[in-house]
Image: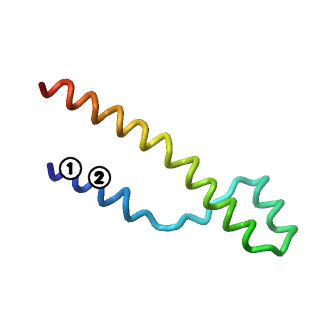
Amino acid sequence: MRILISCLLILLTVAEASSQCSMCRAVLESGEVQETAKGINNGIIYLMAIPYLLVGFVGYQIFKLLKK
């Protein structure tokens, strides 16, 4: 139970990441619009989070199945 609570707290307290791929970075450095940069960063975080959530959900379902 502690592990589950710890994992949930870690997932819910993710700090904002400011990383970009090299092509996105080159495009954003040429422009001066900060909203575009924030949107791309949020999109990267969103795309990165979905696989982890899906794997966690499948793992939880398997855990429940094996516990029966």
Residue 10 found in image quarter? bottom left
The colour style of the image is rainbow
Total tally of numbered discs in the picture: 2
Quarter of image, res 5: bottom left
Q: Position of residue 54 (x, y in %)?
A: 43, 38
On screen, residue 47 versus residue 38, left or right, reads left
Would you say 50 lies left or right of 63 here? right
- Going by the image, does 41 lie left or right of 65? right
For marks 2 and 1, give the CA distance. Answer: 6 Å
Residue type, label 1: Ile
Horizontal and vertical percent for residue 46? 56, 52
Q: Residue furthest left?
A: 68
Judge left or right: residue 27 versus residue 3: right
| Nearer the observer, 42 or 22 | 42
Q: Are marks 2 and 1 in contact (CB under 8 Å)?
A: yes
Please report the residue visible at 46 percent of the width from the left and 67 percent of the height from the top: 15
Q: Is residue 58 above or below residue 49?
A: above
Q: Which residue is mark 2?
A: 7
Count residues near mark 2 (Cα–Cα under 10 Å), then give few for <14, some for 14-19, many for 20+: few
Q: Residue at x 30, y 55 (%)?
A: 8
Q: Within 10 Å of the Cα at label 1, are there few (<14), some (14-19), or many (20+) other Cα atoms?
A: few
Report helix, strand or loop for mark 2: helix
Residue picked out by circle 1: 3
Which quadrant: the C terminus?
top left
What residue sits 75% from the left and 66% below the top? 36
**SS of the residue at dot 1?**
helix
Place of residue 50 in the rendered image (x, y in percent of width and height, measured from the top left): 50, 44
User: Is 56 rendered above or below residue 6?
Assistant: above
Residue at 16% from the left image edge and 53% from the top image edge: 2
Q: Position of residue 25 (x, y in %)?
A: 76, 60
The numbered dot on residue 17 is: none
Residue type at numbered disc 2: Cys
